[in-house]
Amino acid sequence: MVGLFDNCEIQITCPKCGHKTDKRIRWLKRNSKYTCVCGNTVNIDTKQFKITIAEMDKAYFDLQNTIKILHE
């Protein structure tokens, strides 16, 4: 299922060099680390993030379904 927020970007800062990298939420759903331009591997704890995004997506799709039902 494609999520409502999948194309939104989140900025991640490398703890070693401070370089800022934008990552889309759909990328963060599938990955938990990336290599910065400085060569540092940045580990991202995405467990709670994935849970929260899934809850937000579900709430949005539930709202859409409720609106459809009300308009029938």
Image (cartoon, rainbow, N blue to C red):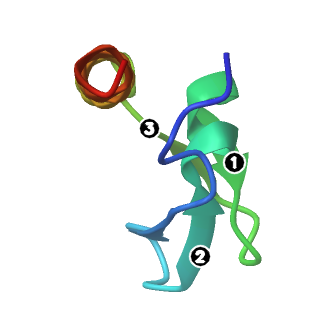
Along the line of sight, the residue nearer the viewer: 44 or 6: 6
In the displayed structure image, the side of residue 11 where residue 45 appears, left or right: left
Q: Amino acid at mark 1?
A: Tyr
Along the line of sight, the residue nearer the viewer: 34 or 69: 69
Residue occupied by mark 1: 34
Rendered location of residue 14, percent (x, y): 47, 69
Q: Quadrant of the C terminus?
A: top left
The residue sitting at 43% across, 84% down in the picture is: 18
Q: Amino acid at mark 3?
A: Ile
In the displayed structure image, the side of residue 65 where residue 8 appears, left or right: right
The residue sitting at 38% across, 67% down in the picture is: 15
**Tag shown at residue 22:** none
Residue occupied by mark 3: 44
Distance Cα–Cα, label 3 vs label 1: 8 Å
The residue sitting at 31% across, 28% down in the picture is: 71
Q: How packed is label 2: few (under 14 Cα within 10 Å), some, or many (20 or more)? A: some
Rendered location of residue 5, percent (x, y): 48, 48
Which callout, 3 or 2, points at the residue further toward the start of the chain? 2
Is residue 48 at least partly visible in the picture? no
